[in-house]
Amino acid sequence: MDLILRENAFLGETHIVTGAAQGIGFAVVEALARHGAQVAMVDLDAGRLEEAKAKIEDAAVSPIIVPANVSKEEDVVRAVSQVLEVSDCINGVVNVAGITRDARITKKSYDDFNLVMSVHLGGTFLFTREIASQHWHPLFKANGNEPLDDGVNRFIVNFSSVSARNGNVGQVDYTAAKGAIESVTRTTAREFSGYRVRVNAIAPGPVNTPMLAGVPEQGIEAMKRSTLLGKVAEPSELAATVVGMVCPMISGYTTGQVFAANGGMYMA
């Protein structure tokens, strides 16, 4: 992967990325590691994480493997604690992990609905809460409850979707979770302002990931036509957007925002 920013832009920083074994999550790991960050790779399966880690080239610091189910509270508590044992500073998290269980409302089971919500929305909430509870809030308390104006780069990047605005047949759970994540982003930006954490979200359109693999070719062609750029995004393009959101030189005065990266499929 080519450099997006200056070399070693994130050297000395520790970034957590969920859904890191494939798709957008893996592309984000590659991009952040390529720019010098120590990246904690979070996903369900340790074996797949090891395989993904082996594919990463030109990482200034070797990524950390952290197997965890983002929808399970005890896993997330342990994962954040594990990262803090390796590094005494977690700079931020990119919450990418997600699943789909597509079915129209009348045919969707409540178990599937809850599962999709718990991975997307629950995982985002749990990592947000635990990084703050275990790390940022203690720093804030130690600073006399005064804002952490120490110059440390602190961020959260959440993943929404164009579907949160457009809706999508068969995805009432997915679209509901993504819409909720946008609200969580704005509330977190307000609550974490004293920690000087910039909290933003990215709302992609269709992306060439394993999640899209089950869509028939005619469906993908229709998605392409629905964008102004006439294409489905590549994971690396979303990763480049994330890098810009993580970098304080680019997005240092931006928080509580949702960035549309949908090729013009939807314009707010």
Image (cartoon, rainbow, N blue to C red):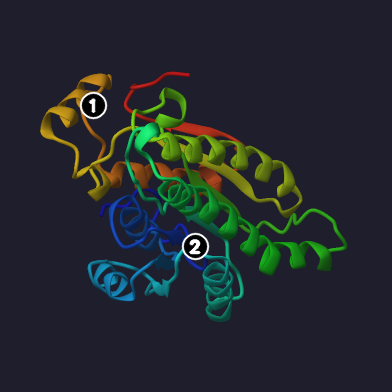
| Direction bottom: furthest residue | 85
Per the image, label 1 sits on a secondary structure element best described as helix
Residue at mark 1: 223
Q: Nearer the viewer, residue 154 or 121?
A: 121
Residue type for callout 2: His
Residue type for callout 1: Met
Total tally of numbered discs in the picture: 2
- Pinpoint residue 7: horizontal percent, then vertical percent: 38, 58
Residue 171, visible in the rendered structure: yes
- Pinpoint residue 254: horizontal percent, then vertical percent: 60, 37
Hey, which quadrant is residue 36 in on the image? bottom left
Compared across the picture, whether 195 is left or right of 59 comes to right
- Pinpoint residue 225: horizontal percent, then vertical percent: 20, 20
Hey, which quadrant is residue 88 in on the image? bottom right
Could you tell me if the residues under marks 2 and 1 are in contact, i.e. CB atoms within 8 Å? Answer: no
- Residue mark closest to the camera, 2 vs 1: 1
Name which residue lies at 38% across and 58% down. Answer: 19
Name which residue lies at 40% across and 30% down. Answer: 163
Name which residue lies at 49% across and 62% down. Answer: 15
Residue 247, visible in the rendered structure: no
Per the image, label 2 sits on a secondary structure element best described as strand
Residue at mark 2: 15
Q: Quadrant of the N terminus?
A: bottom left
- Pinpoint residue 227: horizontal percent, then vertical percent: 27, 22
Sequence-first tag of 2 and 1: 2
Compared across the picture, whether 209 is left or right of 186 comes to left
Q: Nearer the viewer, residue 222 or 238?
A: 222
Task: Determine crowd level at label 2: few under 14, some 14-19, many 20+ residues with C-alpha closer than 10 A.
Answer: many
Name which residue lies at 61% across and 36% down. Answer: 183
Above or below, 253 relative to 29? above
Above or below, 27 relative to 43? above
